[in-house]
Amino acid sequence: MLQKLDHGCILPWSDKKDEKVNDVQPDFIPRDYQIEMLNRAKKENTIVMMPTGSGKTFVAVLLIKHYIHQVMTDPWKGPCKENKSCGDRKCSCGDRNWKRTFFLVNQVTLVSQQKRVLERHTGVSVGEYSGSHSKTIDTWNEKTWYYEFKQHQIVVMTTDIFKNLLSTGILKTSQVNVLVLDECHHAKENHPMAVVMRDYWNPRKPDGRVLGLTASVIDKKKISGKAELRLSIEKLQKMLQSRLVTPLEFVNQIKDVKLPDPVIYSFDQGNYANELLVITENLLDTMSRYTVKALPEVEQSTYNHIKKIVTAIPVIITEVGIDALRAILEDDRGFIAEIGNYLASPNIAPSKEDDGTIIECVTYKVGQTILKQLEYLKTTTQSVVDNSQEVRMSVKFYELLKYVLKLQYDTGENADPPRIIIFIERRRVVDAMYKYLCKLRREVRGCANLKASYVLGGSTGSGGKEEDDLKMSSFEIDELISIKKQQEQALIDFREGKSNILLATSVVEEGLDIPACNVVIRYDFPQTYRAYVQSRGRARQRPAKFTFFLKKSEIDEKEGLLKSFHDIEMLLREYASDLSPREVAEEDDNELDYNTLIPPLEVEGTGAKITATSAIQRLNFYCSQLPKDEYTDVMPSDFTTEENSGFKTTITLPKLCPVKLSVEGDCLANKKLAKMSAAMKTLEALYSANELTDALLPQFRHKEANPLMIASEDGRSMTLDQKLKIPTVLWRKDLKEESGSFYLYSIRLELTPHDSDFAEHFVKGKDHRVACYGILCKAELPNFPLFTVHPRFGSVTVCIKFERKIDVPIHLLQTYYWFQEAVFTHALDMNHVRQYSDAIFKSYFILPLCWRSKAKGLQFSSSNNKSCFLDIDSRFITQLQKQWDFEHNHWIFGNMPSDLNKCLDSVIFPAYNHSEHPNNKDISGYLYAVIQKSELTAADKMRGRANTSADGLETQTYEQYHLEKHGIKLQNPSKQLLECRNITRHYAFLTPHASKKSNRPPMQLIGEICKVHPIPSSLWSQATCLPSILWRMETFCLSKELTDTVYGNYNHNISLLASHCKDYFSEETSNLMAKLRRDLEYKGDIDWLETLHPITHKSCGEDYNLERLEFLGDRFLKFVSTLFYYRTMPDKHEGWLSRYRSEMISNQNLAVRSCKEIKLPRYILNKKIDPKEHWIPPCFLSSYTIDKLKEAEEAVSSASEETLNSLDLLPDTELSAEVLREVSRLKKARMCVEVKEFLGNQSDDNSYNDAVVQLCELIPDGHLQRLETKDVADSMEALLGLCVAKYGYRKGVDLLDRIRISTFQAKNGADPEILNDHLYEPTPPSQISSLPPVAVRLARSRCENLRNVEKAIGYKFKEPFYLLEALTHASFNDIDTCYQRLEFLGDAVLDALMVFHIYEQKPHYDQGQMTDLLSSLVCNTTLSKVCTKLELHRSLLYDSVELYNVLARFFMNFENDQLNEWCNDLSLERVFVDSVESDTPDRIPVLNLESKVVQAPKLLGDLTESVIGAIYLDCGEDILRVWEVIWPWFEPFYIAFSENIPKNPKAMINELYPGLRRMTESYPGDHYKFIATVTIAKRDENNKVSKYDFKTVGRDRETAMEVSYGRALHFHKKYLVEM
């Protein structure tokens, strides 16, 4: 026996150091025959043939683990700039020679199962991919797959997806190290497995190892002999380029997989239910009157579904019984209801001609006949059962039931019941038998242990007849929605023993992980040898039974087939035991080499390749991706003609395809080849026209096609600048430079107290000469407006004024640094920061100022003399320093003066606290500002205390209290007390609400026991305002800096700021609509303070924010980008334009561009600031940051220079974990030292480098403002909205130029002055004018019929082609254009006009109200009412029967004058009430939008928008003229909606039922349909919860969900509102 190392159970790569390797399950020990297969597979490509249950998958696991070291590197991202040899695993870009392991399956249900097995036993990450996991997986691009392959080392997927990866060049065969083909016997003809191996896997350049897994290579009932067997095997070996092997132990009947011999259980069918079978024959006769091919294509699918139901009925009778049939016929979701649903579909339902004639199609007539016959069958069945004329169950089912019950009886009561799998051919029979077994278990005592479950499954390959028969009814929606979960749960129940009978179709034969069972019953005889082997392999728990249920009349025939199966098995064993070299079988002359006849389409460089067998599929996929509505056919048409030498096909692309041509293929032997040839040539033409990418995928789905999108890496400052909000004027200026030149600004305060009797010293001090605080900085600050801060005792108006430019000796700077510490640390108690004079961070000083006489040099606290000036009060700073104990680092407090009048501007505290708190920072909670002398003395009773003590004694006096509490005997108890207030420790005075707290009553303190703080009360009170003042000043500087960046050399007039004293600015605007005119150019001044508005988010808690302006800018951006793409892409359809626009105005693009061009995140404020907690004072740094810098400096200084120089040279893979941690620590420390060096050097360069990134990591989050992409995009839109509202259209476009958006020239670095000149060019003509002359003449003749439309809309067109284009649907073949581009334009024009009107007329509306009002005005319901009132739909040109039926069914909802009433109805009911009347508490049916129109068709709203677009172009893009025309259409709605803004049903239901459940799922069997479910729950007075599900089926998920919400709202109003 081989060592474990050889078969992959213990491998060197399983070191826990590798992060990609997870824990491997140790419970798997391979058997000898599995090791034998592994060794064969390691030598060559191998097909392993082993019976079901013998562990084929684990052979694959062993092989994968043997080669696992090859998949441990990341895939190569592409060349990078840093490393010339990129891809050699020395940089972060990955390995150029990366590989992955692929495990391919044929059934979607096997993907998750195989993924779990591989993940458990390999220990690496395993990805799973199938159509059920992502419906857009076919459109994933190379970048998407790169991240998937980077995340997973093993990939499990369906073969179709793997084939698409190879055909698009996203994956190359050289990147596959092991390819496992599960159930590889399918690899024949045009199966995806065969296509992969035949067309893409090159046998001359073998890449990865191929391993095929199968239980049997034979898929027939019998073979003629060994020659035929050898030929079948050789074909498979040739196809897979592999060798078939089987374990020798299997040849000798190995013990581990000993399988039971087949046993026949016979019965006599006899005559059963003949009367009912006669009726079913009539049903079959009715269906046989027509062949499917003779019917129109739109009817064929429905006819097939009805036929399958009819053919299943006699089978259910004979296989299960009449009782089961009766249940299905009486079920409200059974056969009758199902057929009725099919007949109600739009393609089948009767249509009404203009003259009132009812037209019924063939399928509808046949269906109605079938329904009548089924009703008669249901009545007859009920009569037969009631009269006991027949046994309720069939003979076959009765025998099955006896057999199963006997098995359970023989097992005994104490033993576990046998586990049984029953294989049944037809899916409907499985369903009928399951329901009948459940009924028997409920009603028959002896059947109580029959716990059944069922599995039906599904496949992904090209289905044949068997698969087609297994399609479920589309009407059973509830079952279809949960079918996948139900199947998984059924298997879980069977594994856990919750069920002991599993009813299954052939899906259980292959691959699914089914636990060992005792009994396998073939209810229907297997069709092939493979089915026989695989179902037999399910019975592997000893003792096992393999039983066939056969009628006595067919025993001889079936025994012969069983003998054939046995002979095939013996031949296979004999063949597998022969290890001699095989001779290659001769090629079949009849087998066509498609790639020789029709050369594939290949793209050099990418490796993308389309072969003949996949050409038709790829062409259909391309056409299916074209933008379309549900009424337009986008599939290509083909026409085949027969010629002398063969057949030739011509393919015509659909109208919506940008490439207008018909392609003729080569003349080939048969029609199939001719179509392949034409499809291949069509794809070549599409690729040449740039409609296919280099991956040969539709360009429309290519994720990187937009030339205006820039990579996120280009906006690197997005992650750097967003955190520190420090203006450039205050950022990193060296305060110690030798020049010593500074700018001095005063901070003058004016208090407006809340109380008129406010007596406290605030602005003017009593016993000091300090006039105010001042700012000393190295750079000139902008002129600031007056602004207000709000301490709790009043409002303080702040004026920051430039005084003069001064020179300061360097020796005084240390004194100024100390004063910063005295104010912010020792007084204001800002303990989260510390002074760090070595760092150049926020560079300015706060200093005391006093008035000084020019002549005498005297100092004053105030002066009106013009000869006086404000200067730094150095004397005051010196006095404070004298009262600071530098040795012990605390204040030296003074004694209370005997004259209390001298301490009325003082900060005091009780002396008995002094000994306990020697450091002044610790006693800040006990500091008080003196207000005035009190009327009380210490002999008076204490105020604010209870009248009596706990012992009932009278209240104490102040003197008694201090004696008893503190042991202090007062010397002068008759002396007046001092009224004081607490010194606040909260400095958030930015908004008025902070001052509305009720003031506490003043404290009464005894002067003789108090100490006096060196800082006067008035200066302390002013100092508490400093954090808010300085933060506001810094935000002003940010606003000014951003304005300079955006507007450049415009004059920033400070006189505009005069109105900003109270409110920073007003949003009131006049004639805002005129700002959208393109011919107006603003030449006035720019108010920089306005820019503060767009950078302030609502979360800041300010009185102003960006929301209204963001709402305005968002729509203006949509408007301008729409004009850009409409003009610059005349050949692109609406789908392209919408996609490009959405990408260009996306949050990501806006954020990245604004980062790259104007560094917008540096200025954005999105966090409410508490200056004490979140603000860093000047000349300070965070305490945490300083500690980290010191730790880093110590770590680096303790390391040797040699160690530091070798950090980047050490390979991580060769170091121990301990050394790696030390290396990582030193690298971080070295970066921190670089940060310290960065902070220690001045730089005029405001660029943000890696040191800033690391600095932000060292600053706690509380001091930073972290932004999301949406925050930046919102601010950019608000900035644009402000620009347009204040300065007009052209200035807004200039701003877009500034961030290089909405222009192709931006890609080439064009001059910003000419970037958007295209927006001012002449209006583009109608697309009709560019059609061929014949088409133009035809169009001109049709324009004469549009006079009524012009009269209705109130506008006469100068060029009628605009209007004709606006009224032409894509299905109209005579004119090769449609209204979609104009609808794209009109939508943006309407949005912009309505937004600007709402913004101007409703200044009191917030963003939410404006959004709701706009949504109501431009929603489809309002637009459809406008369209219907103007009768635009009557002039619509179209050639679609489906569109006609939809419009007809919509207008049939109205009778007489109801249509006018609906048009004039100013409510916003989106769902017609009468369409949901069937919703009752007892029954809420599923609503199919294809059979009932419950909303105004979207096309009506699109017509309104397209006409608006046409008017805009025809009037020369005069936006005001458009407004004059359309305002009468919308004015009634605007007035009504403004009075009571309507909310859509979704918003209302979400408010009424916050815990509701909503879900949208694909309609089973039709990925283009969706089921939208809204579930609401209501609790009644008895606390009982009732749930109501509203399900709607539609082609559009949004529409279906909206209807479900509308139904829920109607239901709530009708039944639940009073509960």
Image (cartoon, helix red, strand yellow):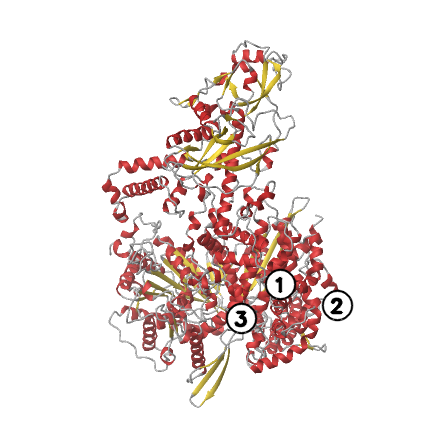
Q: Quadrant of residue 387?
A: bottom right
Q: Secondary structure at mark 1?
A: helix
The kind of residue on which mark 1 rests is Ile
3 vs 1, front mark: 1
Total tally of numbered discs in the picture: 3
Q: Residues within 10 Å of mark 1 (few under 14, many from 20)?
A: many
- Callout 3: helix, strand or loop? loop
Eye-nearest disc, 3 or 2 = 2
Distance from disc 3 to disc 1, alpha carbons, whole Å, reads 83 Å
Q: Nearer the viewer, residue 721 or 695?
A: 721
Residue projecting furthest to the bottom: 644
The image quadrant that residue 190 belongs to is bottom left
Give SS at disc 2. Answer: loop
Q: Amino acid at mark 2?
A: Glu
Mark with earlier residue (3, 1):
3
**Circle number at residue 1519:** 1
Near-viewer residue (874 or 236): 874
Which residue is nearer to you in this view: 357 or 1599? 1599
Image position of 840 with respect to 882: above or below: below
Residue 834's disc number: none
Q: Position of residue 226 (x, y in %)?
A: 32, 76
Pointer 3: what residue? 269
For residue 546, above or below residue 230? above
Q: Position of residue 754 (x, y in %)?
A: 63, 30
Whole-percent x and y of residue 9? 30, 53
Q: Is residue 986 visible?
A: no
Q: Which of the marked residues, 1 or 2, is nearer the chain's N terminus?
A: 2
Work out whether residue 954 can be spotted: yes
Q: Could you tell me the amino acid type at mark 3?
A: Gln
> Considering only order in the chain, which callout, 2 or 3, is on the residue closer to the N terminus?
3
Residue under pointer 2: 1455
